[in-house]
Image (cartoon, rainbow, N blue to C red):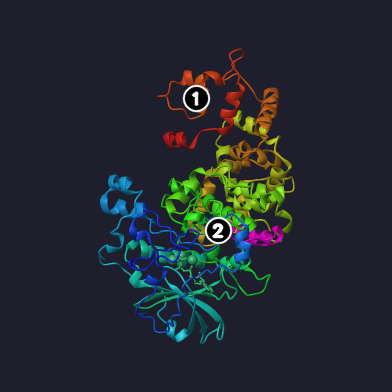
């Protein structure tokens, strides 16, 4: 999703949700500038010399199989996307700078009308890219168009790549009306350059600029958008075909997350096929909304596309898990041809994303495998801490046997290990006990992750193993997301080794286990084991500081039930509290 900055009110929005008669349904609650009009984004007098406008189709996403369409749930059927009123992007940061923080908080929910009327105060639109575009490339026909720019076919005129067909995304500088917009383009190129090389990510060649435009030269994907394939199939994929798509999407997204990059705009429009072949490779494109994120950092700007946006993005505190949610939405659409969260209006969609549970009762769900349902449900968990990670999803029973590629290292493991390393021996003992109740699926994933760290001959890992594993997978993006700095938080490992048993305790996610049906059973079993070898008498003050309770809370009242009064040891309730450890809210206070 991008930002359309031109104002155009006269024409109807071709993407607006429609009612049964095809009439656009407009949200009375959404302010007018939200109505995106693709045509209004078309440069009226293109200054780009090679620009050859293609006729704008009245309906860019025709329903290709009305018969199939009629069979499924009306309304939410996956017919055509409507890019949501997207300009909420960066609103908070933008307003904070302009009006001071107080007003920004108040206005954060609404989108300011005058956003695009911001005066241009000496914006520096120099990117430091080569100016030699026209001598290097011969630009041909337009192949695609977005809100921000358009993409043309091109060919290298000279050099090593002479004759090579490529795609050039042209982003007009006239559309970069704020410092943030300029920074976005800078970052788009930087991220693409850094991540290029992964087999499911569009290959980057070069970036150019001139007075009017920025040009991003990349591999030409001739197979069209994933969206078009979904539409041409009338929405539904067999489980096998859906798996093939999912594996590729998860592979590239897990890779991005390991590099500390969150895409933030994952949707079927942003995956292209390299060729028209049935088994052509899928490539992620459009890093226009992507950002770097440090392992402990939370982002807060609302970006993305309504149908695919994660609940925590709407709550303004999110990280890489938000991408996984979007993948869950894509998976749901692939498997059943309908959208999991549907409403006639954008605010309705947001409400559904926040509150509604997607339906798994209507056809074809009852006839799909239970693994497929479990897979989608675990991607669409509203609590990001309970959601699978991209890397974990690749080891889910539904797709693990067809993920031909090597499983990527999961960055979230290090987050969990950090918390473990900082824990008291009592909490470590509690986690060790819980780890013994892990499911075979959880162990499968942990074993793969442990293997990726290439343990020493004695079967244990040290900090050095982790450092080496990261080095093997490192790209330039890790500098900006400061992944290596993060290792210093694991330095306690420097003086010791960790075997697989302890690794399971360190890398298991208590939140994810809580989401399982058998949680209560696991926790009880773990508590019994903990009783035998880990439980000990504990002072109330010790427990309070252990859990990061601030001295201001009435500690005795709060932890009263967490300690068994007969012997001063942890009660079951205290044990569960202990498993969760210091809450992140309290950590902030402690630091
Ligand atoms: N490498 C490529 N090969 C072929 N077509 C491409 C390529 N990159 C982009 N396109 C086409 O151009 C369209 C717009 O590209 P992209 O999504 O990067 O632009 P955008 O301005 O950021 O759009 P958005 O409105 O989605 O933010 C794509 O949907 C696709 O159809
Ligand atoms: Ca864009
Ligand atoms: Ca796009
Ligand atoms: Ca974009």
Image x and y of residue 39, in percent = 40, 72
**Looking at the image, how many numbered discs can be counted on the residues?**
2
Question: Mark on residue 256?
Answer: 2
> In which quadrant is the N terminus drawn?
bottom left
**Position of residue 312 in the picture relative to residue 424 (left or right):** left
Of residues 227 and 561, the one drawn nearer to the viewer in this rendering: 227
Q: Which residue is mark 1?
A: 544
Based on the displayed image, in which of its 4 quarters is residue 200 positioned? bottom right
Please provide percent x and percent y for residue 416. 58, 42
User: What residue occupies the far front of the structure in this picture?
Assistant: 21
Q: Nearer the viewer, residue 168 or 73?
A: 73
Q: Residues within 10 Å of mark 1 (few under 14, many from 20)?
A: some
In the depicted structure, whether residue 568 falls above or below residue 458:
above
Residue 547: where, in percent of width, then height?
51, 29
Is 9 contained in the magenta span? no
Q: Which residues are magenta?
A: 235-255
How far is the residue under mark 2 from the one under mark 1? 38 Å
Seen from the viewer's position, the closer of residues 497 and 580 is: 580
Q: Residue at x 30, y 58 (%)?
A: 113
- Under circle 1, the secondary element is helix
Quadrant occupied by the C terminus:
top left
């Amino acid at each position: 999703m991008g930002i359309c900055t031109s104002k155009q009110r006269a024409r109807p929005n071709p993407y607006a949700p429609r009612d049964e008669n095809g009439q656009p349904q407009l949200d009375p609650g959404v302010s007018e500038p939200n109505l995106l009009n693709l045509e209004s984004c078309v440069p009226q007098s293109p200054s780009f010399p090679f620009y050859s406008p293609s006729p704008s189709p009245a309906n860019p996403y025709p329903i290709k199989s009305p018969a199939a369409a009629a069979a499924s749930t009306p309304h939410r059927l996956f017919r055509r996307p409507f890019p949501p009123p997207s300009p909420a992007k960066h609103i908070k940061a933008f307003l904070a700078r302009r009006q001071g923080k107080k007003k920004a908080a108040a206005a954060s929910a609404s989108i300011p009308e005058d956003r695009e009327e911001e005066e241009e105060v000496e914006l520096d639109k120099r990117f430091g890219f080569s100016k030699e575009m026209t001598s290097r490339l011969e630009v041909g026909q337009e192949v695609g168009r977005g809100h921000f720019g358009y993409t043309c076919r091109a060919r290298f005129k000279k050099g090593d790549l002479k004759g090579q067909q490529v795609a050039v995304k042209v982003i007009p500088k006239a559309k970069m009306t704020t410092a943030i917009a300029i920074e976005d383009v800078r970052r788009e190129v930087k991220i693409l350059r850094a991540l290029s090389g992964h087999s499911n990510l569009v290959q980057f060649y070069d970036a150019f600029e001139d007075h009017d435009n920025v040009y991003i030269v990349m591999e030409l994907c001739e197979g069209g958008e994933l969206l078009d394939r979904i539409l041409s199939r009338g929405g539904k994929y067999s489980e096998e075909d859906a798996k093939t798509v999912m594996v590729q999407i998860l592979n590239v997204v897990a890779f991005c997350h390991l590099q500390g990059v969150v895409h933030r705009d994952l949707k079927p429009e942003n995956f292209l096929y390299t060729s028209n072949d049935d088994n052509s490779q899928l490539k992620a494109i459009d890093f226009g909304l992507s950002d770097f994120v440090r392992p402990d950092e939370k982002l807060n700007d609302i970006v993305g596309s309504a149908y695919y946006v994660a609940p925590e993005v709407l709550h303004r505190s999110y990280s890489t898990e938000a991408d996984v949610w979007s993948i869950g939405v894509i998976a749901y659409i692939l498997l059943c041809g309908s959208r999991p969260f549907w409403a006639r209006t954008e605010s309705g969609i947001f409400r559904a994303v926040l509150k509604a549970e997607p339906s798994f009762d209507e056809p074809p769900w009852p006839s799909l495998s239970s693994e497929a349902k479990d897979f989608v449900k675990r991607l669409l968990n509203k609590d990001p801490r309970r959601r699978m990670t991209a890397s974990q999803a690749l080891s889910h029973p539904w797709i693990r046997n067809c993920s031909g590629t090597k499983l990527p290292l999961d960055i979230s493991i290090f987050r969990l290990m950090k918390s473990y390393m900082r824990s008291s021996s009592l909490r470590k003992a509690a986690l060790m006990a819980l780890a013994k109740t892990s499911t075979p699926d959880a162990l499968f994933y942990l074993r793969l992750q442990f293997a990726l760290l290439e343990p020493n001959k004695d079967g244990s890992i040290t900090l050095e193993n982790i450092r080496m594993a990261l080095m093997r997978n490192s790209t330039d993006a890790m500098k900006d997301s400061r992944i290596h700095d993060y290792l210093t938080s694991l330095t306690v490992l420097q003086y010791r080794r960790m075997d697989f048993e302890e690794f399971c305790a360190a890398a298991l996610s208590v939140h994810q286990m809580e989401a399982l049906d058998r949680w209560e059973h696991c926790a009880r079993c773990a508590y019994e084991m903990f009783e035998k070898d880990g439980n000990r008498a504990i002072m109330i003050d010790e427990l309070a500081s252990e859990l990061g309770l601030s001295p201001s809370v009435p500690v005795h009242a709060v932890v009263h039930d967490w300690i068994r009064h007969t012997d001063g040891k942890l009660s079951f309730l205290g044990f569960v509290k202990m498993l969760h450890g210091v809450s992140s809210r309290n950590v902030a206070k402690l630091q």
